[in-house]
Amino acid sequence: MKKIAMIVMMCFMMIGCAPEQNMNKEQSSGEEESWAYEFVKYNGANYEVTSTEATEDVKGEKLGEVERNIVDMDVEGESEEVDFDSNSLEVGTPLYQHTENSESLLYEMDGKLFILEKKK
């Protein structure tokens, strides 16, 4: 009787220690995109969001504001990116020209300016 109890107990232990096989694994529907970096689209180009601060003296003309957060669009199944779309910045985030670097833009957050670097 002790042997049977030991065998049953060992079976339960082996099942509990077995590698997890996710039988109920959710399958990706392809609705959610993955991006290599955070960006804003402007004038047909992607600009990478950085945490590099800029000074007011390089702030040029206001170009517009982030109009859509495309992460929200993924849920709806839409994925076409257009100017003033971002995958990280909030809708309404102001965008400005960078007066000293034509390959960069600026965005304003919490009263500070940060650089957006053009991706090639």
Image: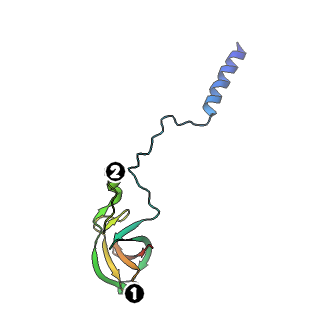
**Which residue: 34% across, 50% down?**
75
The image's mark for residue 59 is: none
Q: Is residue 106 left or right of residue 92?
A: right
Return the residue at label 1: 100
Residue 72 falls in image quadrant: bottom left
Q: Are marks 2 and 1 in contact (CB under 8 Å)?
A: no
- Image vertical order of residue 29 relative to residue 67, above or below: above
**How many discs appear?**
2
Residue 117 falls in image quadrant: bottom left
**Which residue: 62% across, 34% down?**
18
The answer for how far apart the CA atoms under marks 2 and 1 are is 38 Å
Residue lying furthest right in this view? Answer: 3
Dot 1: what SS?
A: loop
Residues packed near mark 2 inside 10 Å, few (<14), some (14 to 19) or many (20 plus): few
Locate the N terminus and report the quarter of the image it occupies.
Answer: top right
Residues packed near mark 1 inside 10 Å, few (<14), some (14 to 19) or many (20 plus): few
Q: Is residue 49 left or right of residue 16?
A: left
- Image vertical order of residue 19 relative to residue 108, above or below: above
Return the residue at label 2: 75
